[in-house]
Each structure stands twice: as C-alpha cells, then as structure tokens.
Image (tube, coloured by chain):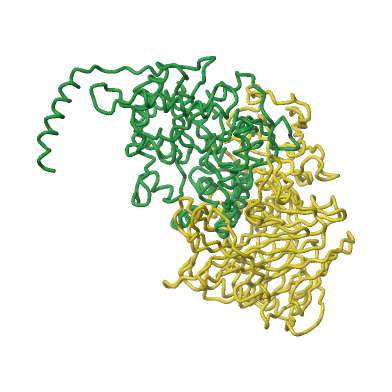
Chain colours: A yellow, B green
Amino acid sequence: MESEQLVATSLAHLVESASYTGSGNPTTKFQQCLLLNISYCPASEVTLSQGKKLIVVVYNSLGWKRDDTVRIPVINEDVIVHDSEGKAIESQLLPLDDVHLGLRNYYVKAYLGQTPTKTPKYWLVFTVSVPPLGFSTYTISGAEGAGASSTRSSVYTFQSREKSTIEVGQGNVKLSFSTEQGKMTNYVNSRSLVEESVQQSYSFYNGYNGSNDKAPLIPQNSGAYVFRPNGTFLITPEEKASLTVIRGPVIDEVHQQINSWIHQITRLHKEKEHVEVEFIVGPIPTDDGIGKEVVTQLDTAMATNKTFYTDSNGRDFIKRIRDYRTDWDFKVNQPVAGNYYPINLGIYMQDNRTEFSVLVDRSLGGSSTVDGQIELMLHRRLLLDDSRGVAEALNETVCVSDECTGLRVLGKFYFRIDPLGDGAKWRRSFGQEIYSPLLLAFAEQDGDNWKNSHATTFSGIDSSYSLPDNVALITLQELDDGKILIRLAHLYEVGEDKDFSVMANVELKKLFPRKKIGKATEMNLSANQERTEMERKRLVWKKEGGSSGTEKGVRGGPVDPAKLVVELAPMEIRTFLIDLEQKFFHRRHHHHDVSDV
Amino acid sequence: MATTTPRLLFFFFCVLISVADSKFMVYNTSQGIVAGKLNVHLVPHTHDDVGWLKTVDQYYVGSNNSIQGACVQNVLDSLIPALLADKNRKFIYVEIAFFQRWWRDQSDAVQRIVTDLVSSGQLEFINGGMCMHDEAATHYVDMIDQTTLGHRFIKREFDVTPRIGWQIDPFGHSAVQAYLLGAQVGFDSLYFGRIDYQDREKRKNDKSLEFVWQGSKSLGSSAEIFSGAFPENYEPPSGFYFEVNDKSPIVQDDITLFDYNVQERVNDFVAAAVSQANITRTNHIMWTMGTDFKYQYAHTWFRQMDKLIHYVNKDGRVNALYSTPSIYTDAKYATNESWPIKTGDFFPYADRINAYWTGYFTSRPALKHYVRTMSGYYLAARQLEFFKGRSTSGPNTDSLADALAIAQHHDAVTGTEKQHVANDYAKDCQ
C-alpha cells in the first residue's frame, strides 16, 4: 500500500533528522503490521538475541498526550522493554491462546497464501506515553537472566462445575464473574463508587424466510439490507465451558469459549476505568438451513424508561425512545428490527443515578429493546436475498485451498458505567482513541546505537502545548498546491458535560511551531469557498411559527489574524486553509527542533 | 404469416411517402417559471452507484453487462451532444468518482465544451462528493474527506461550488448529513428519496415532505437546511421513463403515423403533476427524470422531454420546464412560504411493513472494520506526510484518499454490494 510506504518514509525522516547530514533518502526501514488485529506481525515476531533489539516507534495522531497500551506478538519468553529515555518499564507477557493462533494461521493463509512460518508464544503488553501528534520510541530486547524483565501472567482455568466468584482488575474498576454460570455478574468502580450488576450474554435471531408467505402477506426475507428476525435464541455456555483468568501487572483478562463458534476476552487495563470486550464470532452455523444474526446483550437493573441514545455518524447523540417516533404516531410491526439504530461511536442509557455507555470499533446496529439492556448486532450470515436488488445472499465465507468456511469476525466493544452526567468525558475522549489507534512502526537494531543516531521522541506541535480536552484535530493535510488544510472539531454538544460543553480556544501558532503562519483563511466544511462567502449567500427560510422555539446556536467568533486563536463552540467544526511562510522541513533548523522536544 | 408480408410492406411504403412531406419540427423548450401556474420542474439525472452489482471500474467502462447493463462512459459521452443540441436542456451530475475519470479521458476540445456547459448552467454538479455516501455506517470524518475531495476537484477544474445536497438513494438519513454535510458545506437545500413509509404517509397528508431541518441541537438554526423528501422515489412518475428499451409510451406527435398520442400524453402529464401538487406546498413540484445508470443514450430522454414541455405548455394547464435542483430551490425560496421544522434524523428506514433496513447497519462487519481502520490510518498518514513535506514523486496518500472515498458509497461500507464488489473495495484500500 502506497500510504504504508509514505508512513514508513515519513517516520524514517523524522527519526533520522537528529543525525541528518545531507540530502537523500533516510536509511531506516520501518515495517508496520496491518494484520495485527489477527495477531500477525512478522516485524515483532523476531528472535531477540545477541544484542538484536526491536525498536517500536509509537505514533499518536491525537492532539493531546496519550497514555495507552501496546500489544504485540513476540517469540522470546524473556524480554525487557525500555522507554525513550532508556528506562526499563513494566511489561507483561500473556500466552497467545489456541483460538487466536488458529484464527491467525487460517486468515494469513487466506489473505497472503502462506501459513506463517513462526509461532509466537506470547502477547507482550506494555504501557506507553506518547506526546500529541508525535511519537515515543520503545526498545524491546531479550532479557535472559536480567532483572526488570516482563512479568509472565498468572493463568488459571476454572471448570464450570466450580462454584465461586472471581474478581478481576488491578485498578479502580473490578469485575466479578461467576464461574458456575460462566459469566460476568458485577461492575464496581472504587473511585466513582458506581456499582452495577452487569450480565453479558450472546443470542442469535433466525433470519426470517418469507418465501412461502402468500398474499396478503408480502414475502420478506432477512437479508443484506433488511433485518427481519424470526425468533431469538439465547446462546448458553456449553457444559464444559471453562473460564480462564489471566492476571498481571498491566492487564487482567478473562477468556471464555461461549460455544464452539463464539470466543471472547474481557480485559481490564490497570490504568483505565472501562472494560474492553474482544469477541470472535463465527463461522455462524447454517447447517440447519437457517441464516442467523448474532447479538450480544449487556443487562443491568437500570430503570431506563424505554430511552437510550445513539450517535449520528460518530458525532451528535440522538435520543431514542423504544416503539416511538417523534414525527408520527408509530405503528409497531417489528418490535426488534424497528427499534434498531446505527452506531458508529456508541450507545448509552441512563437512570436516575448512573449512565451505562458502550463504544464500538466499527459501525454496527444496536438497540435497547428491554429497559436496562443494551444490544449490539455483531455479525450476520444469511442464506436468502431480501429482494432489494443485490440478488445475492449475505453469506460471507473465507476460502483456503478451495475449502470455504463462514467468515469469522473479530472485534471489540468497550463499556463503562459512570455516575449520571459523567459519561460524556469517556465517550468523547476514549472515542477518539478508538478512532485513532496508536500507529506502530518497527525496526531492528543490532548493537546499542539507536539512541545516538535517532530521535526517540517527537511532537509536531509546540512542546508546551496540547489541544484542549474538548477539541480534536480532524484534518491536518498538505494539499497539492502547498496550502495546509486543517479542521478543528469541538467534541461536545451543548449541555453534554458540565466542564467541556463550553467555548474552547485553539492557538494556531502553537500547532505550527517551526513555521510562521502567513495567512489563515476560514473555509466552508468542504474547503471550496471562504466561509464569509458561504454565509453571505446563505438562504434564510421562513419557518412555521416564526423563529420562536428554535435556538440560534452559538458560534466561535472571527479569528484575529494577529493572534490566530480559533474559538470553537460546542459541536462546531471550523476549517482553515493556511499558507506557511517557509518550507516546513528546513534542514539546518531541523536538527535543533527535534532534539529540543 | 408469410402471406401478409407484401401487404405490410406496401402499407409502410405509403407511410414513408407521406412522411417525406413533413417538416423539421422545432420544439419550444425555452419556458421558464410561470407565476400563477403549477410549475413542473423536470430534473434530468442519472444515479450512478460507485459500485454495487458491478465494481466501480465495470460500471465505468460497461463491462460485465450480463449482471447489469450499465456504462457510465455511455452516459457522459452521449450527454454532451444532447446538451449541445438545445441550450434549454439541462442535466445534473452527481458522482465525481465517475466524472473525474471521464474528464481525464477527454480531449482538450471536449473539455472546453464541457467547461462551457458548466458555466452556462446546462450541466450542473450536484452533491459533488466522490460518491453519494451512506449516512448510517459512515463516520463523519470520512464523509467530510470524500466530499472535500470531490468539491475541490470541481472547484479546481470548473471554478464552481455545488449548491445542493442530493442523497436520493441512501437508506435513511442522518442529522449529521443535514447540518454538517449540508448546511456547513454551504448547500442551499438537501433532497432525498427514502424515508419510513409511515412517516411519508403522514407528510403527504400534512404537505410536510418539504421542511427546514435543524439537525444539531447545539448549532440550532445556524446550521439548518431546507430539505425535501421525494413523494415516492428518485425516479420519474409512472409512465415517463424514456431509456432506449423502456416501456413508457413515447410522445408520438406525427399526425400521419399510427399511435398519435399527444393529447393522451399531455393528459397523463397533467394528471401526474396535479396529483403531486396536491401533497406539495407552493406551485412548484420536482420530477426526477432518470434513475440508476440511465441516459446511456441521452437523446431518448431529451427527445421526449422536449416534446412534453412543448405540448404541455401549449395545452397550458400546467407549466413544464427543464430545471435543476438549484432552480427548483430558488423557486421554492422565492415563494416566501413558511416551512415546518424537522429535528433529529430519519432512522430507521422501512419501505413497508416488516421491512426495516436495519440489517445493513451490521452487514459485512469485517469490511466495516477495515474501512474504519483505514480512516484512522489515513488521518495519521496525512499528518506524517505534512511533517515530512508532501511529495509529488514519492509515495503519498492520494491513492488511499480515493479508495476510502468510494468505500463510503451507500452500497460499499453498507455491506449491500455483491461479494465480488466487496472484494474490490477492500483491494482498493490496500
């Protein structure tokens, strides 16, 4: 992929700039692992020995400093991780389980044509701290006999017959699981004092087969477009279902094989107050001749009064009321499908004490079809077409050597429970982290000279600056005419958060510390006209009842060309074209700049 | 039946002789808006999916026609002479992923002609993103990026800015589309085809298919947009389809031939117009004259619309004109009518009982994840590209930008395309 090369080359330029002496291309060859989500990363799966070290450059595209974890497959059983300053940091090894290895080997064969030759034994997990729009460097080396090496996780498997309650979590949030039922039972946050009974389960809907429906019924199958369930079936953990608990200094995990085709890991990061759930769903069985749509449900005792909230394209949250439409007297004929809404960022519900938020890693459908419950549809495999033109059943398969099996889907969702009114901060800031995961670039280093010849940290913005907590930089791009396109987005709605639903200020000069801003022109959203021009042409329509009852909406004021401070009102996005007065990468100055950071 | 052939041949011979006497017919298509009459705005358009049953490449060149006879090159190639033939004819083009390819394939001479057609307003870019993005499974950053890519192409090549949002096919409509990708882009209005069947019935009765949409609680009326949901769909009224093989009766106005039907067709036209006027505020209605991949031979449509405009206006009961969504919007605005306010969004969408289009929110979850992953990657890659300094010769982010843009199409990230097309989108992103 061309962009992958671009990323590798750009990072090479940035790390080498400290020792950069002349023109020409950088020599550092970075590799990336775009299949890391299926546990495949040839760059990190190297045997570290005799001084051979793995360099991991961790890039953060968010406008604020970020503490997060990195998770990569490794071969060695004893490794040690050093940070940008050369200090040994805490890390944890977790066994790479058979389910993930099987998925990895099968899908690598399917995508790349070859089964991986190596088999990493562990996931290495460590906590990183990365400056805004910048990188930090972590060095992983073999650590035979040395101190401060990675902690190997403790692993314990409970059989379903054992009756006990286990608690996991090293930080403020702790989750309880019943080993007998094989499921989560309780969530408690010792800092916010929120406690809630939470049970998670999987179910599937049978896809409706309308092919035998006679008039006046209109045949309607469930298909690629249309969700039409025909009964819901709870997936109960099988008799021999076990529950494996993995604990360590960075992360605790609970692994569950829900049935023969659903596996999940529930994770608690020590420094975080949310729960991460990773699922592998599929192949969805269809040997009974029926298509199925698989959902997970999170149940609480919350009295949510038919109300829940879902995002609009990852931005504003819209209030949803079950079996109700604002604009007309709604006649319910599909009590589940008719209450489904698109989810890009998340879904949440509230009662008079708490709010329960779930965030997602991709778009999917979800609902709250019962008070106190949130449902997400994770995967669907259907055998019939739903007659809206595509004329093909949504029956995704993956083939290896001409043998095809139903698609397995690996994904994550995240949930957190907060006191009422406190959930927005997590939804907005962690939502940005989901959308912009840390970008990892790998290089190998023989010997001990990386630090001497490479910059180990970098920030593209002023080292004393970071964006306000309620603002994201959603575009920073050099256009083909040399102008810089930037967009700043306020992340909160009016009234959404008591601290952050306020006017925010961004200092443009601090975003371009090594350049002088010649001119900053505010544009419309798609940057094809000046904003003043757009506002001048705007039609003002007459509305029924005049303008009474409609809020005008608050906007940030004009930008003073001397101060170059951009005001952003709640939910405002502002777009600028910027002329920079000198070419950005002036070599002579650059040495100084990077080593300054 | 062989014995009847000589007589038939003789008969045709007579007809041909009489045709030789007829003269070149000039149709008056110059009519503009007429105050006090019901104005029927004929909006010639084609709806060209940037991938669905065929891949985007197959649609462009017209291959794999056993799946669907569709070729975007045919549309654009035949459109230009059709517009040149009569300066009153108008056309809108929407999907810039296709238009950009075609544009790059044209000679300087054709490019000059097209530039003139755009300047005169005969050819207008509407919506103007690379694709008509989905509104349920798309992230707002991707919607902005793909719209920007198309809009900046149009600005660079033609120095124009699209005025109208045209989301006629997506399966439900989002608040973000209205207030962000509509009002904040600078659009004067937003039109779409698919809303819940129960909602549509109520809006027909209340004459509220057109309204002012305030999609953002925070930005309120500062980000509102005039919006219109079509009464049925984005196609012409029944009986007014004029692709080469379409079944609708053409306007046969040669009195010397069989099947002369001018009055019948005018009556059909007036009846369809009055029926739509009964559910619409003001004396302006829009007819979306076209549908999926139509105008492969553009003359067939324009020939019939020329005649309809000519004879309907001669009849005089209603006023028919060549129009665009911009002309229609300006006409609506000029009436000074008051419009109902809409807040929230149009999800979920059902086109009839038991048919909620809520499955596609999840369909192809792996493709959806891939698109989202590439979206975040593209954002980071552009930052790094800026820090290094953009290169025109070395690797850059342009190909990822194009691939991600078409992946936002309403049959791409939605998961509602055929399997081979899904594979193609994923391959483009690599």
Whether B356 is drawn above or below A108: the answer is: above
Whether B392 is drawn above or below A142: the answer is: above
x, y percentage for residue B67?
37, 52
Q: How many dots with numbers?
A: 0
x, y percentage for residue B216?
71, 37
Q: Is residue A202 left or right of residue B74?
A: right
Furthest toward the top, the residue is B35
Q: Is residue B139 left or right of residue A425?
A: left
Q: Which residue is at the front of the view, B277 or A496? A: B277
Q: Quadrant of residue A377?
A: bottom right
Query: Which residue is at a point 65% across and 57% down the rendered structure image?
Result: A336
x, y percentage for residue A198?
79, 66
Q: Quadrant of residue A573?
A: top right
Q: Which residue is at the front of the view, B161 or A327? A: A327
Query: Which residue is at a point 52% across and 35% down the rendered structure image?
Result: B128
Whether A216 is drawn above or below B274: the answer is: below
Regarding residue A579, the answer to whether it shows in the image is: no
Q: Is residue A299 left or right of residue B70?
A: right
x, y percentage for residue A557?
76, 29
Query: Which residue is at a point 51% across and 49% down the rendered structure image?
Result: B411
Regarding residue A554, the answer to whether it shows in the image is: yes
Q: Which residue is at the front of the view, A249 or A302? A: A302
Whether B62 is drawn above or below B256: the answer is: below
